């Protein structure tokens, strides 16, 4: 019941977020309307980062307590994080074509974020490929912790190297280099996608518990 | 710069497909598992004397 309510709230929030992004937010002066992809591209990576941080914490706790519930949370957040990071990479590519003139470039930000994507995807594949569930959970936990540490590298990539990708506008020291009319829709969409991710995680945890019950 | 609405719609459509597909996959799996668990429950004897 609680999951269903969360699902409805997330659905309404996502619809509102899309309406704000496509209809209410102002047309950006330099890029034009194509900049509206940002309201999907940026919040999806923030949500993916949050999911992976939860994965790393749950994985560390699992390595200490070996509780199945903690592993289920790590598994669910990994899957949801990969989904949101996949959306981030794909929408970034679509945004890159009209603005940079290319779908893809081996630039530090794009490459480092792809490494994180592959590491967490690897953690999911490892779970499938390993027969012993406890060993699978242990290996996935170690890989997820390593993957989460790489998020710092992704964040710093635009500061440490000269990249095609722009430097951070918000997650940096000093005042935000973004007007309120653009910042507000961005935060609304972050909240909406965050609720959607929370709904997916809750539901995936329930499915994983049911899978364990069916296999017992 | 041209507005490129096609790219905007493509990005949002792709995200809708990804999220919608994942939601559908979860719903389907949950339904399957519910049926498996219910079938197993139905096969189990209700009392120690039922079998």
Image (spheres, rainbow, N blue to C red):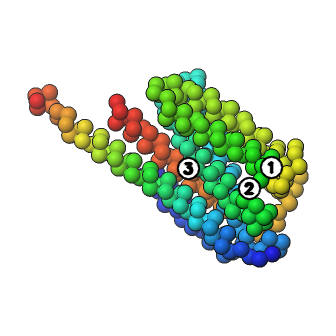
Residue A4: percent from left, percent from top: 44, 55
A119 horizontally vs A198: left or right:
right
In the image, A45 versus A165, the foreground residue is: A165
Q: Hey, which quadrant is residue A40 in on the image?
A: bottom right
Q: What is the chain identity of the residue bearing mark 1?
A: A
Q: Residue at x 53, y 46 (%)?
A: A201
- Nearest to the eye among marks 1 and 3: give it: 1
* Mark 1 element type: loop
**Distance CA(mark 1)–CA(mark 3):** 31 Å
Q: Hey, which quadrant is residue B48 in on the image?
A: top left
Residue B25: percent from left, percent from top: 44, 52
Task: Tell me which label, 3 or 2, sits earlier in the chain.
Answer: 2
Q: What is the chain identity of the residue bearing mark 3?
A: A
Q: Residue at x 43, y 43 (%)?
A: A207
Residue B34: percent from left, percent from top: 32, 45
Q: Is residue A40 visible?
A: yes
Up-down: is A132 above or below A172?
above
Query: Disc 1, disc 3: CB below 8 Å?
Result: no
A57 horizontally vs A174: left or right:
left
Residue B29: percent from left, percent from top: 39, 47
The quarter of the picture where the C terminus of chain A appears is top left
B47 horizontally vs A188: left or right:
left
Q: Residue at x 87, y 45 (%)?
A: A161
The residue under label 2 is A104
Name the disc covering residue A107, or none: 1
Q: Hey, which quadrant is residue A115 in on the image?
A: top right
**Distance CA(mark 2)–CA(mark 1):** 9 Å
* Mark 3 element type: helix
- Nearest to the eye among marks 3 and 2: give it: 2
The residue under label 3 is A198
Are discs 3 and 2 located on one and the same chain? Answer: yes
Task: Tell me which label, 1 or 3, sits earlier in the chain.
Answer: 1
């Amino acid at each position: 019941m609680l999951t269903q309510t969360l699902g409805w709230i997330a659905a309404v929030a996502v619809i509102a977020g899309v309406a704000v992004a496509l209809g209410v937010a102002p047309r950006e002066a330099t890029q034009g309307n194509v900049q509206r992809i940002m309201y999907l591209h940026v919040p999806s990576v923030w949500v993916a980062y949050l999911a992976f941080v939860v994965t790393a914490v749950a994985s560390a706790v699992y390595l200490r307590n070996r509780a199945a519930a903690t592993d289920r949370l790590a598994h669910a957040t990994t899957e949801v994080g990969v989904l949101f990071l996949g959306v981030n990479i794909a929408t970034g590519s679509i945004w890159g074509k009209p603005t940079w003139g290319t779908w893809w470039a081996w630039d530090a930000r794009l490459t480092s974020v792809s490494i994180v994507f592959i590491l967490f995807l690897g953690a999911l594949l490892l779970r499938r490929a390993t027969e012993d569930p406890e060993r699978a959970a242990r290996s996935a936990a170690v890989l997820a912790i390593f993957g989460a540490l790489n998020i710092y590298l992704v964040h710093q990539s635009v500061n440490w190297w000269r990249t095609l990708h722009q430097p951070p506008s918000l997650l940096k020291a000093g005042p935000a280099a973004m007007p309120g009319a653009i910042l507000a829709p961005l935060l609304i969409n972050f909240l909406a996608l965050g609720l959607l991710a929370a709904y997916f995680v809750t539901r995936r945890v329930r499915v994983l518990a049911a899978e364990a019950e069916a296999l017992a | 710069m041209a507005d490129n609405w096609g790219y905007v719609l493509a990005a949002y459509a792709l995200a809708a497909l990804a999220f919608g597909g994942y939601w559908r996959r979860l719903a389907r799996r949950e339904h399957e598992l519910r049926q498996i668990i219910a079938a197993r429950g139905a096969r189990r004897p209700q009392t120690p004397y039922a079998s």
